[in-house]
């Protein structure tokens, strides 16, 4: 994986060989929170992105202290290598990776290709329960706000995009970007009042960064993909989608694989922006 800026990927072969190592912790994070129970890699533990990572009262993440406790319950220590994987070509595994990094968790990697590639290779999945872990709370976590964008910051960033010093990456589908629809194909309407995109945003759907087997494209291919839309390393970049799962995948590509220094994930994304008062949108879709 040396072609990438950082050593943040492991292969399915590596996981098959090292999954039972003492200081390797496998964590599965799926969009379908029931999928883990139908079969998972032996030794992997589960994170439910809705119940484990989100505050249950307000639209916000659990605080760093709660994440420390969660990691302690999973038996994760700062000395461990944490391997994240999941369905949908690692959408939600990327989301967990971004959230963990945002809070200061170290030694994180994604299994390249995720659950999709593991299953396609005919590798074993088990329904056996992973033994309960125990450990002290993960120490020293603190949020790095350089990795997260908020609505008002995004609004101010529009001027940077216009000036050519910033870039905005909308990783949703072209129909979502144009305003033809307000949700992904085959997904329910999520209650967004307006369709369209943030002014100045470039539409680079997240899936264009992945191969058919769910693995990431080469560094050269990825650089070319983003450069063609004016998204280059010298710019301050903000990525968004609908609730930040797809944009986490693109954030991972830009920051971890390509080494961009200034990339933020706007977790409010379109479900916040499309419902907000006092923010501009662009809509290119025209009714016939």
Image (cartoon, rainbow, N blue to C red):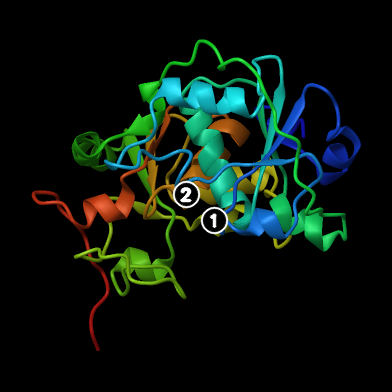
SS category of the residue bearing label 1 = loop
Disc count in the image? 2
Check contact, mark 1 vs mark 2: CB within 8 A: yes
Q: Position of residue 138 (x, y in %)?
A: 57, 17
Question: In the displayed structure, would residue 207 be above or below residue 102?
Answer: below
Q: Nearer the viewer, mark 1 or mark 2?
A: 1
Question: In the displayed structure, would residue 87 be above or below residue 163?
Answer: below
Give me the residue at 30% from left, 38% from top: 164
Give me the residue at 67% from left, 24% from top: 75
Q: Which residue ends up furthest to the bottom in the rendered image?
A: 288
Label 1 CA crowd tier, 10 Å (few <14, some 14–19, many 20+): some
Name the image quarter holding the C terminus: bottom left
Question: In the displayed structure, would residue 114 be above or below residue 71?
Answer: below
Residue 227 left/right relative to 13 = left
Label placed on residue 31: 1
Q: Which residue is mark 2?
A: 245
SS category of the residue bearing label 2 = helix
């Amino acid at each position: 994986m040396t072609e990438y800026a950082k050593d943040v990927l492991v292969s399915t072969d590596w996981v098959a060989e090292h999954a039972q190592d003492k200081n390797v912790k496998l964590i599965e994070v799926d969009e379908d929170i029931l999928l883990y129970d139908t079969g998972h890699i032996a030794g992997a533990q589960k994170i439910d992105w809705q119940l484990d990572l989100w505050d249950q009262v307000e639209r916000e993440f659990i605080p760093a202290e709660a994440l420390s406790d969660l990691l302690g319950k999973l038996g994760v220590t700062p000395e461990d290598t944490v391997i994240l994987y999941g369905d949908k070509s690692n959408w939600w595994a990327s989301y967990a990776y971004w959230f963990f990094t945002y809070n200061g968790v170290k030694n994180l990697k994604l299994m390249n290709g995720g659950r999709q590639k593991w299953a396609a290779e005919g590798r074993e999945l088990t329904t056996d329960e992973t033994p309960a872990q125990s450990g002290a709370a993960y120490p020293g976590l603190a949020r790095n706000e350089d990795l997260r964008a908020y609505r008002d910051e995004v609004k101010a960033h529009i001027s940077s995009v216009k000036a050519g010093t910033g870039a905005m990456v909308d990783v949703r589908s072209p129909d979502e970007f144009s305003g033809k629809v307000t949700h992904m194909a085959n997904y329910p309407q999520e209650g967004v009042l307006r369709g369209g995109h943030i002014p100045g945003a470039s539409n680079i759907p997240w899936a264009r960064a992945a191969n058919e087997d769910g693995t990431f494209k080469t560094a050269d291919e990825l650089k070319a993909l983003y450069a063609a839309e004016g998204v280059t390393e010298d710019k301050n970049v903000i990525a968004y989608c609908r609730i930040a799962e797809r944009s986490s995948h693109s954030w991972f590509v830009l920051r971890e694989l390509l080494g961009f220094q200034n990339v933020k994930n706007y977790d409010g994304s379109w479900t916040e922006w499309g419902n907000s008062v006092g923010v501009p949108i662009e809509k290119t879709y025209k009714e016939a």
